[in-house]
Image (spheres, rainbow, N blue to C red):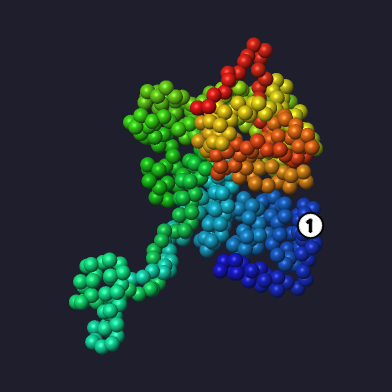
Amino acid sequence: MKNLRGVLCVGVLALSMTAFAQPELHEAIDAGDIATAQKIVKKGAAEEIYCGKLSAEDAVKVYEKIFKSMPYESFSNCQSQFSYGYGEKVCANAKAMDACTEVISYLLFEGENGNVKATETLEKVAKAALKTKAYAKAVKVPVDTSMWFACPKKKGPAREACVDECYAQANKMNDSLRTESCGTNPEHFVDTTIKVTRPSPLYEKLRTGLLEGYWKTPKSNAERFAKIMQASAKTLSIPDTSVINLAYVDRWAAKHKADSTALPGGELFRFCTAWQPAVDSILTAKEFETRCPVFESFVDNRDNQTYKVKEINGTRWFVENLNYAIEDKSMCYDREDENCKIYGRLYTQESALMACPEGTHLATDDDWKMLEIYAGGANTAAERLRSNGSDDYAFTAAFAGYANKNGISVIQGEGAYFWTSKDVGDGRGIARSMFATDKEVSSIPVDKKFWLSVRCVVDAAPAEKAAPATAE
C-alpha cells in the first residue's frame, strides 16, 4: 500500500504541473548545476524526484519542500541523499514515522556494512526519532487467528451442529478437557481476525538493529553502535545486561572464567578496539593470560597515511586495505571518496603490483596460503579472518566489493576480493575472495583489469625467517 500511495502522490505532483522539464532536470542534476535544478523544481516543472549523484546537501537544496511534503516518496526515490541530508528533520516530524523508519533501516544496513558516515548519521537520526513522542506509541495490528466461541444456547439444528463441531475439533487437537466440556459448555473453533497491541515498529526496528548491528558491523565501527545503544537504552527498554559497555565485557569475561572456556577472539578484538587498555585490566583481574592484540604502525611516506600491522604466524600483514591513490590506476568504490576512507582503494592487478609502499610488497599467493593454513585451512579460514566473523587474528577482512573492467562497482558489504602477485596468463591474475556469510577463502583467476582490494605485507629483514604455518 505504501508503494501505491507513493505512485499516486507522484502522479498528483506531475498532473499539477503545466510544463514538464524532466530531461532538463536530469541534465542539470547530472552536470551538478544546482541553480538550474532549483529553478526547474521551483517552477513545478519536474515529473519525478531525481537525485542522480547529487550530494545529500545539494539534494536538500533542490528538493527540500518536496522532501517535507512527500517524505516517504522522497526516500523511495533518493534513499541515500534523503537519509543523510534530511533524515534528522524527517524523524522530528510526528506525522512521518513511515519515512523515518525507512531512513533508520537504511542507515542500520549501511552501518552494518561498515559505513562510518551512516553510523554517525544514525546517531543524530535516532536521537531525533526518540524525542518525537508520537513514535513511541504502541500500535494495534490485525492478526488472523482461530478462537473458541460459545455455541448457540437455544436448542435446534444450529446448536447440534456446533456441538458436533466441538467434539470433532477437540478430538483433532487431543484436548480431553475440551471434549468433556463439549457436553455441558460447547464451543466451536472459528477463524477470526483480532487486533493485537505491538510495540512501536520504529522502536522495534531501532532496538533490534542496534543489538544485531553491533555484532555484524566491522569491529572498527562497533563502538559507534555501542554508543548509540547506550544513549538509547532507557527509551528503547534495552535491558542493562544487553547494553554493550565495559560492564558487559566484565560479565562476559567472568562467565568464560567460570565456564573455563577460551575467550572468543572476534568478540575480544571487538571490545579491544573500543576500550583497550581497560579490557586488558579486566582480563588481568580475571587472571586470563589472553590480552588485546598489539599492532605495529606503518607510515606510508608517500602520503603520510598510517596503517595497522599485525604479525600473524611470523608474517607482518597490513590489517587494513591499502588506500594509496595512483592517478587513473586506482579508484574508490562507486567513485565516491567516502568509500575509500572506509574500505581503501581498488586497483587493477598492474597497479596493485606497484601500489604497496617501500619496505612492503603486494601479498603473494604463498603469503595467502600460509595465512589460510594457519587460520584452519582455506575451507574455514574466512570465519577467522573476516571483520564481522570471529576474526581470531585481527586480520579484519573488509567487504569492499570490487569493480569490473568498466569500473562498475558491485557487492560492497557482501564480498572481499584481494589481488595477489601471481599471474596465470591469458590476461588473468590470482585473487583471494571471501564473503560475509561463508567460511571459505577461495583462490580464483580474475581478469587483470578488474579492480580489487590490496593487502600489503611488510618485507622480512634478511635475518628473519617466517615460522612454518600449521593448522590449528
Can you say which quadrant of the picture contains the N terminus?
A: bottom right
Residue at 28% x, 75% y is 166
Label 1 residue SS: helix
- Lateral position of residue 231 relative to residue 241, left or right: right
**Image location (x, y in percent) of residue 197:** 39, 63
**Image location (x, y in percent) of residue 323:** 69, 33
**Residue type pointed to by label 1:** Ala
- Lateral position of residue 250 relative to residue 398, left or right: left
Residue at 59% x, 42% y is 435
* 162 or 324, nearer to the observer: 162
**Image location (x, y in percent) of residue 11:** 67, 71
Please rate how many residues cluster around mark 1, counting C-alpha atoms within 10 Å: few if below 14, some from 14 to 19, many from 20.
some
Residue at 62% x, 58% y is 75
Quick check: can you spot residue 413?
Answer: no
Within the image, what quadrant is residue 469 found in?
Answer: top right
From what the image shows, is residue 334 above or below residue 21?
A: above
Which residue is label 1 attached to?
A: 28
From what the image shows, is residue 179 above or below residue 454?
A: below
Most distant residue in the top direction: 463
User: How many numbered callouts?
Assistant: 1
Residue at 58% x, 30% y is 372
